[in-house]
Image (cartoon, helix red, strand yellow):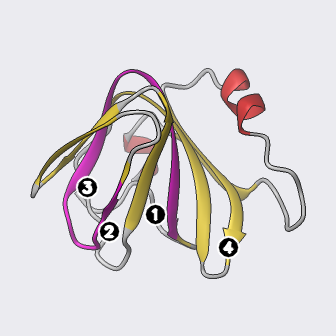
Amino acid sequence: MENEFDYNQQMDVKYDYLEKIEVPEIVKGCKDKWFNQSLCNVNSSVFRLGIFEGEYHMHKHDEDDELFFVIEGSIVLETEKGNFELKQYEGVCVPKGTMHRPVAKEKAVVLMIENIGIDPIGKY
């Protein structure tokens, strides 16, 4: 399923406990239009960085909520329950089972919180 889309999904956790998380370095080195990097685990969740440009596919996570929080640029988070225009320092939590997709006209940097083991591709 993952090969169907041109997304760079780095599910490995980059930082351990008590390690400084350096988002600017990851952003600077990213050449992909769709990139996810798991930053660290927090209890039963993963704190993830997304670098988005263009349109992701519409999908859902049957068992997992997902938080999107924009730190640079802007996105439109399209959902089956309406669209959310998110600018810098704005976010929204998508409840499990809700079809959604982020769309970024220009490069955007987004932080996400999800359950450990979530498949970012989701079901579509």
Q: Is residue 39 above or below residue 64?
A: above
- What secondary structure is found at the residue carrying circle 3? loop
Do callouts 4 and 3 mark residues in contact (Cβ within 8 Å)? no
Kind of residue at badge 3: His
- What secondary structure is found at the residue carrying circle 4? strand
| Cα–Cα span, label 4 and label 3 | 24 Å
In the rendered image, which residue does mark 4 sit on?
42
The quadrant the N terminus occupies is bottom left
Identified at 85% across, 68% down, the residue is 17
Residue range highlighted in magenta: 92-114
Q: Is residue 98 above or below residue 21?
A: below
Residue 61 placement: quadrant: bottom left
Q: Is residue 23 magenta?
A: no
In the rendered image, which residue does mark 3 sit on?
59
Q: Is residue 109 magenta?
A: yes
Kind of residue at badge 4: Val
Do callouts 1 and 3 mark residues in contact (Cβ within 8 Å)? no
N-term mark: 4 or 2: 4
Do callouts 2 and 3 mark residues in contact (Cβ within 8 Å)? yes
- What secondary structure is found at the residue carrying circle 2? loop
Residue that protrudes farthest toward the front in the picture? 89
